[in-house]
Each structure stands twice: as C-alpha cells, then as structure tokens.
Image (cartoon, grey):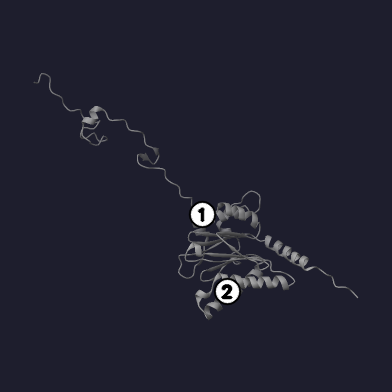
Amino acid sequence: MNMPFYVSPEQLMKDRADFARKGIARGRSVVVLAYDGGIAFATENPSRALHKISEIYDRIGFAAVGKYNEFENLRVAGVRYADLRGYTYDRSDVTVRGLANAYAQILGTVFITESKPLEVELVVAEVGATAEDDQIYRLTYDGTVADEHGHVVMGGQAEQLGRKVGDGWRPNMSLGEVLRLAVSALGSSDGGTPRTIEPGQLEVAVLERARSRRAFRRLPKQALTELLAQEPEEDSGTGDGESSGGTAAPQAAPGPAEQAGSTGSPETGENGGPDAEPPAGPKEGAP
C-alpha cells in the first residue's frame, strides 16, 4: 500500500506564496499617487485593449498586476458587487472599504483552499471630498489588506520603485508633478540606465475630486504629452529696479545742478533734465 506524500502546512503555504510572488514580479509595475486634485494611476502598458487600470463605481478606481485573466475576473466581480449594493440600498453605501473586504475574502479563500493561488496584486482607491478623506487599499495574493497613504507601488520591482517614489512624493503635488515622478520611477524599473517612456506606451487614469459623480477619467496621449512636458514653476527673480535680463545698473547720484532743476523726465530732456539746455544766465554788464 502506497503512503500519501505528506507536506507540512507551513511548507505548503510557503510554496504557494513563492509561486504567487514570482508570477506577480513578472508583470510591469503600477504606481498610484495622491495629488492635490485626487488620485492618479500610472503604468507602462502598450496594449490599447487590455487595461490594468479601470473604474469600479462612481468614485472608486481599480488597478492590478499579475495574470490578466485572473485580475479581470476580480474586476468584473467588483463591478457586480458595487452595482448590486448601490441598486439595493443607495449609491452612497458603495464604499472602497467594503469592496476591499470582499476582495480580501475571495483572495484568502482561493489561497487556502485551491491548488493554485491567484497571481494578482490589487489596489482599490476612492477619492473623497478632501485629501484627508481619500482611501487607498492594497491587497496581496493571500488576501492581506494594507491601508496605504499618499502613494503605493506594486508588481515588478515594487520595493525599489517604492523607495524612489517615497523619496520624491510630498502632499499637495500637482498632477503634472506626480505623473513625472511616476514615469521616472517606471523608467528605472530595469535597474540599469533609466529609460524614457513615451506617452503612447503609458496607461494613465485619475480620480478627480472636482467631479460631482463619475470621478474616473482616462488621460489620452495628447494630455499626457502636455502634462509631462510642463516644467516646474520657478520664481522669475525680477523685482523693483530689475529688468528681465538681470539686475538694473545703479543710477548715479544727482548733482547740484540736477537737484536745483524741476523733477522732469531725464530721458526726454524736458523741464530742466540733464539733457535740457542750461538756463540762460544774466548778460555781461547787466546790473
């Protein structure tokens, strides 16, 4: 009689986790950044048909890395969950926290019970009325939920890119600034010489706080080109007594003759300026 092959639960979970991590690391990274007007999602994705960034509900966005067919099934399940809850109760009852909990249950159940875990990593985010109300949740292959603040990087060399993004990110950055930071990080993902990623190779979307209902919006190539080409605003450095080309030359102190004259325009020579004719003095021999 053959004895069944025994594997300890610890080794089994470790093998599944290693398998899932290797699959996720093969995918291109996704960067999620909060900015002054909402939340931005960016990734390198030359495909125009297979999206890694999508809308779930009114003010909720979704981004994923890993196997496309697996995270696409999760996206569809999230849309159905949100639509059903919003229709049954109210649209305001659909929250990113509830969606994250639903995803965590699915991922955790598959990781424990199925022979193969899902090779996916997710970010779900909801833009609030203020920056303090924004919510970003990161979900891993085993159902672990992490509440992120400000920025998150997943997939590929997430740890290395996360340090780069963390060093460059600050609160209340503009959309152009966070996109330039995201593209710079994605271009350095290979670990060698930083690459320049063209706007046509990017997939970028935003959750805009100013929108009343449907906050999700994709950024087309032309808009990306303009945002990435913007330069940071700098002080002009000009002030009183300075010209646009540099510091104005100092003016000489007025002489006694100039002080005695009236305050006219020195350039035109009027009213006793330096270029005016000197006043006629008394004639010789006059009393």
| Residue 285 picture quarter | top left
User: Can you name the residue that lies furthest to the top here?
Assistant: 285
Q: Amino acid at mark 1?
A: Glu
Residue highlighted by disc 2: 79
Residue 283 in percent (x, y) is at 12, 22
Label 2: how many Cα within 10 Å (few below 14, some 14–19, many 20+): some
Q: CA distance from mark 2 to mark 1?
A: 31 Å
Question: Dividing the picture into quarters, in which one does residue 15 lie?
Answer: bottom right
Residue 169 image label: none
Q: Quadrant of the N terminus?
A: bottom right
Location of the C terminus (image quadrant): top left
Q: Amino acid at mark 2?
A: Val
Q: Residue furthest right?
A: 1
Q: Is residue 287 left or right of residue 240?
A: left
Q: 244 left or right of 253?
A: right
Residue extending furthest toward the left: 287
Label 1 Cα neighbours within 10 Å, binned few <14 / some 14-19 / many ≥20: some
Element class at badge 2: helix
Image coordinates of residue 204 in percent, x first then y, are 55, 61
**Location of mark 1 (residue):** 177
Q: Is residue 8 left or right of residue 186?
A: right
Instruction: Name the residue at 53% across, 61% down.
Output: 40
Q: How many marks?
A: 2
Mark 1, secondary structure of its residue: helix
Above or below, 141 relative to 267 = below
Answer above or below: position of 256 versus 243.
above
Q: Pinpoint residue 12: horizontal percent, then vertical percent.
A: 77, 67
Residue in front for this viewpoint, 81 or 92 = 92
Point out residue 64 in the picture as x, y percentages from the top left corner.
62, 65
Say which label, 2 or 1, has the lower sequence index. 2
Kindly check if marks 2 and 1 are in contact, taking CB atoms under 8 A apart as contact.
no
Measuring 52% from the left and 79% from the top, which residue is drawn there?
A: 89
